Image (cartoon, helix red, strand yellow):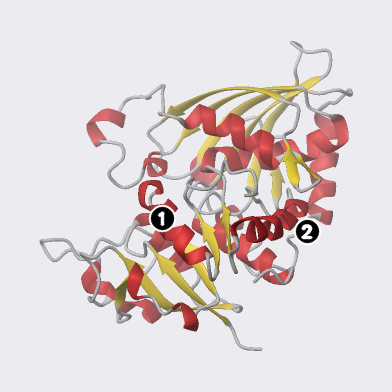
């Protein structure tokens, strides 16, 4: 069987470039078309990412993959849908709604934008965490009379929180969660955080972020029932901050559980999940979904961001929380540009491919 033919929309931006790298020599998917704004349309990829001074604006670690360099960037309207099997959308949310709607009429769309996240018939999927919600995609197709669907990733801050809460919720129950994030500047996009604003500083507010985390976490951890997702009954309070770290989000989490829990039980639970997690065998999956540290100085962004090529979620500082009758506190690290973005989207596409949804 040949590889699935895919297009990347928004290919010149930071997330688009992560897609370019994540799909290089992929065993199941082949990038055959790329699209960006009208400004870039008609140029080869290298010329499209050059700035006015002739500097190549490549933002991803490592060399630009050879396969993409001379590929011609198209406008979205010029994509040949008949020659594609799948769309990866790295478009900003303002434009994403119209573009993804048009594409999903004919093809599956895996998106990093928030345009469709909060629709009732749209699951927010994290492979290995809420795979059963995949069936909602069939409802979405029927409701909208589409041949394809839109499957968005969560906000990158939500990703690490939902991944670490899922095993605790399933085994011990979860009633309340308090989280403070220390988010990398790359999460704001290339031009999202000024050097003067973040150097020697912490920005204690990120617009709309906390609402996203609350809504998305409850939806991801909810249950699919009668063609709808019933949100998890968890009260979530969060404070989202921006810190002078380039890549990788760190979060401090307090969770009140229904049953008694302690660090030993938590470690056993995460280790068990590593051995049972459904992502095994997917090309972009890490060897370990969870890394559990007993060293109190971990996790640290500089040390964790390369673990599992950015696809492993690291947990440390795990302690019994005395504020609750039953509860735990811990720190987590999740790579916002890998698991929380393009490579996580590729992992999602792999999961859907294995389920014959693509």
Q: Is residue 38 rendered to the left or right of residue 325?
A: left
Q: Is residue 239 visible?
A: yes
For the point 66% across and 62% down, which residue is it? Answer: 285
For the point 58% across and 38% down, which residue is it? Answer: 158
* Label 2 crowd (10 A; few <14 / some 14-19 / many >=20): some
Which residue is tagged 2? 278
Closer to the camera: disc 1 or disc 2? Answer: 1
Q: Is residue 155 rendered to the left or right of residue 221?
A: left
Q: Is residue 199 visible?
A: no
Q: In terms of depth relative to the viewer, which is nearer, 97 or 57?
A: 97
How many numbered markers are drawn?
2
Q: Which mark is residue 337?
A: none
Q: In terms of depth relative to the viewer, which is nearer, 327 or 296?
A: 327
Q: Which mark is residue 98?
A: 1
Instruction: Residue lying at the far top in this picture: please name it.
Output: 323
Are dots 1 and 2 in contact, CB under 8 Å?
no
Quarter of the figure with residue 280: bottom right
SS at badge 1: helix
**Residue 261, horizontal then vertical, whole percent:** 85, 26
Instruction: State which tag comes first along the sequence, 1 or 2.
Output: 1
* Label 1 crowd (10 A; few <14 / some 14-19 / many >=20): few
**Residue 232, horizontal then vertical, whole percent:** 74, 32
**Residue 203, horizontal then vertical, whole percent:** 37, 24
């Amino acid at each position: 069987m040949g590889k699935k033919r895919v297009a990347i929309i928004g290919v010149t931006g930071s997330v688009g470039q992560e897609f370019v790298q994540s799909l290089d020599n992929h065993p199941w998917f082949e990038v055959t078309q790329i699209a960006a704004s009208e400004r870039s349309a008609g140029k080869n990829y290298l010329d499209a990412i050059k700035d006015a001074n002739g500097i190549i604006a490549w933002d991803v670690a490592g060399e630009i993959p050879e396969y993409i360099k001379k590929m011609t960037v198209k406008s979205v309207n010029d994509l040949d849908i008949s020659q594609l099997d799948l769309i990866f959308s790295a478009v900003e949310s303002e434009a994403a709604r119209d573009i993804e709607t048009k594409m999903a009429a004919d093809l599956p769309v895996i998106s990093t934008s928030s345009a469709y996240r909060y629709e009732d018939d749209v699951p927010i999927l994290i492979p290995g965490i809420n795979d059963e919600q995949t069936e909602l995609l069939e409802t979405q197709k029927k409701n909208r009379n589409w041949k394809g669907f839109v499957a968005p990733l969560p906000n990158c801050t939500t990703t690490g929180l939902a991944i670490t809460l899922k095993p605790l919720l399933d085994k011990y129950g979860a009633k309340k969660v308090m989280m403070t994030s220390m988010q990398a500047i790359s999460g704001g996009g290339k031009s999202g955080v000024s050097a003067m604003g973040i150097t020697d500083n912490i920005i204690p507010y990120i617009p709309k972020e906390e609402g996203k985390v609350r809504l998305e976490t409850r939806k991801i951890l909810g249950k699919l029932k009668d063609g709808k997702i019933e949100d998890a009954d968890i009260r979530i309070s969060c404070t989202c901050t921006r810190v002078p770290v380039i890549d990788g989000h760190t979060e401090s989490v307090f969770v009140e559980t229904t049953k008694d829990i302690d660090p030993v039980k938590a470690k056993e639970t995460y280790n068990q999940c590593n051995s049972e997690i459904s992502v095994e065998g997917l090309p972009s999956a890490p060897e370990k979904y969870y890394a559990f540290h007993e060293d109190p100085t971990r996790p640290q962004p500089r040390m964790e961001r390369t673990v599992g090529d950015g696809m492993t979620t690291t947990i440390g500082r795990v302690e019994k929380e005395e504020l609750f009758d039953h509860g735990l506190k811990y720190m987590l690290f999740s790579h916002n540009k890998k698991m929380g973005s393009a490579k996580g989207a590729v992992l999602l596409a792999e999961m859907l491919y294995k389920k014959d949804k693509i």
